[in-house]
Image: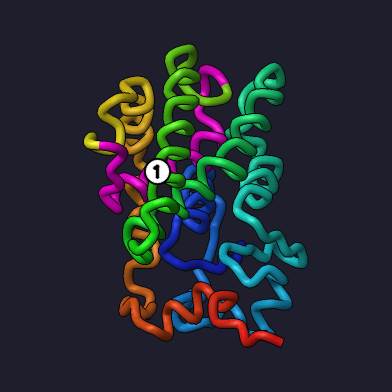
Amino acid sequence: MIKLYFHHTPNPMKVVLMLEETGLPYELVPIDMFAGQQHQPAYRAINPNGKVPAIIDDDRVVFDSNAILLYLAEKSGRFVGDARDRAALLSWLLFAATGLGPFCGQAVHFTRIHQESAYATNRYLREVERHFTVLDARLALSAYLAGETYTIADMAAYSWIDWAHRNQLVLGDEPVWARWPHLRRWFLEVDERPAVQRARSAGKDLPLKTAFDEETLRALFPQNYAVAG
């Protein structure tokens, strides 16, 4: 059985989506990021980057959510599209990994957690708008990001757009996708998949800290508290 090291954040949710879609058996192992468990030596031995998710599958360890998606796609032989879709799948998977995800995360951070920098808030919101516009243009041409079939590229993008949506991210004066009809069509279609609905319930009973206090800030952003040498 696959062990998935988990917290209720977008990157672990990508992996839950894939596991639910494939039906591969898995066990959630909670990593309480708000309490700093990701920095403990035992977990750092699994993921040296001190982030979630990571998986252990027999004797194989994989960390980074997008690497895990690729690994599970190869293991199951599913959600990779046709051979002719491979280039598009890799392109859009990495678009989500290096652009959409980081900028959605920073936009939520600067609108929800640190609101003192108007420049930073504007910078990240504008980049989210740009990424959404790129996605909308792509989805005007095809049903899904890699082509006409649902793949891991869609899972990777969905988890972050859902995060932005649930955090009531506002771009300019409009709700998160009023200007992106093709993106909205795609999101609502993915959102209705049974595996997505099951994934939403994953880990709801885990005893994870919910208070967003000083300990949480230090656990999530320890570099902000580093002592000058």
Q: Where is residue 96? Give x, y as percent.
A: 56, 40
Q: Where is residue 38? Give x, y as percent.
A: 57, 77
Q: Where is residue 214? Give x, y as percent.
A: 39, 84
The quadrant in which the C terminus is found is bottom right
The front one of 78 and 92 is: 92
The front one of 168 and 182 is: 168
The residue carrying mark 1 is 125
**What range of the chain is rendered magenta?**
147-172
Q: Is 151 covered by the magenta stretch? A: yes
What secondary structure is found at the residue carrying circle 1?
helix
Amino acid identity at mark 1: Leu
Q: Is residue 97 above or below residue 188?
A: below
Q: Where is residue 39? Give x, y as percent.
A: 61, 80
Q: Is residue 200 above or below residue 130?
A: below
Q: Is residue 94 above or below residue 143?
A: below
Q: Is 163 covered by the magenta stretch? A: yes
